[in-house]
Image: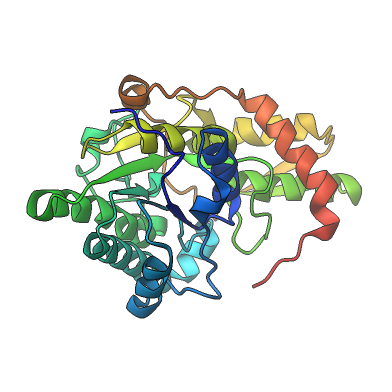
Amino acid sequence: MEKSLHDQKIIVTGGSGFLGSALIRKLEAAGAQKKNIMIPRSKEYDLTKDADITRMLDSFNPDIIIHLAAKVGGIGYNMKNPGSLYYDNLMMGAKMIEHSRLKGVKKFVAVSTICAYPKFTPVPFKEDDLWIGYPEETNAPYGLAKKMMLVQLQSYKKQYNFHGIYLLPVNLYGPGDNFNPESSHVIPALIKKFVDAVEQKKDKVEVWGTGKASREFLYVDDAADAIVKATMHYEKEDPVNLGSGMEITIKDLVNTIAKIMDFKGSIVWDATKPDGQPRRCLDVSRAEKEFGFKAKTSFEEGLKHTIDWYMKNKNNLVYSH
């Protein structure tokens, strides 16, 4: 069923973040009116608190909610903060869905995480394998908290006929990513390391793990495009992967960034640090079949855009701990 976004009132939680900013641009390009999009700020609305969510929904009366808001970080951050990552993400998801149901929201779009998959999922990851095991330990609390939104949406569909969809984007990257060394993911963390090394004329860069683990990456504008397409055209309860369908080892990723940055020194692998999930690569056929999504941006092109953005903006970035 094709829907126009023109008259829909949409709340985008996390709408001022990395993916959120790209999503707002894509929603407007797809016909949503700026005045009909609400981006709740965390200073004003704590989405783990019932009263704040109720106040937000009452003030805006949304037709659609796209729930991107998450507390999230890389492997190091996840290992330090498993309790708060679990609690905050679980509460945000559960309360947002429940209050949306009570308010009569027409469609709830839950944007989850690749971390919801079991540690040893057959590659490429198929949505039907989401429950065959426990997630990778360093990000299991976060991944499981986000996975509960799928259980809740499917249960609410059965009992209340509440309409929600559940999307599983792979690791995202692109301009505007989080470059804070305390909490950044692998691509921005590596870009920062190599830029620093080149500028400080270092002869070596140290990298976590063995380099054997693999990842799949999706350019942020492609991810936003996929979410808009799913919001407009996807109506089923089955979860859907959002990815590019490419797989790259961390070693090849590191070498690619070093090459783009023209880094001539040596790369030192700290194998005492964890690799995280051994392999990540998605089966992306369901998204193409159900709502015509296929990633457009090549990986090297996306990396160059990301590095260019960081080079232009790095002196103005403020990292809050």
Q: Nearer the viewer, residue 215 or 169?
A: 169
Q: Quadrant of the N terminus?
A: top left
| Residue most extreme to the left | 159
Quarter assignment of residue 96 = bottom left
| Residue 161 visible to an observer of this rendering | yes
Residue 217 is at least partly visible in this image: no
* Residue at left offset 30%, top offset 68%: 95
In the picture as drawn, the residue positioned furthest to the front comes out as 7
Here the colouring is rainbow
Q: Quadrant of the C terminus?
A: bottom right
Depicted 23 relative to depicted 55: above or below: above
**Horizontal arrangement in the rendering, residue 83 relative to residue 107 (left or right):** right
Please provide percent x and percent y for residue 214. Answer: 49, 35
x, y percentage for residue 69?
46, 59
Q: Is residue 216 above or below residue 318?
A: above
Q: x and y percent of residue 109 in the render?
A: 35, 47
* Percent coordinates x, y for residue 273 in the rendering: 54, 55
Residue at the image position 67 percent from the left and 26 percent from the top: 300
Above or below, 139 relative to 260:
below
Residue 84 occupies quadrant: bottom left
301 horizontally vs 139: left or right: right
**Residue in the foreground of this view, choosing between 76 and 6:** 6
The residue shown at (19%, 42%) is 132
Residue for point 24% across, 50% down: 150
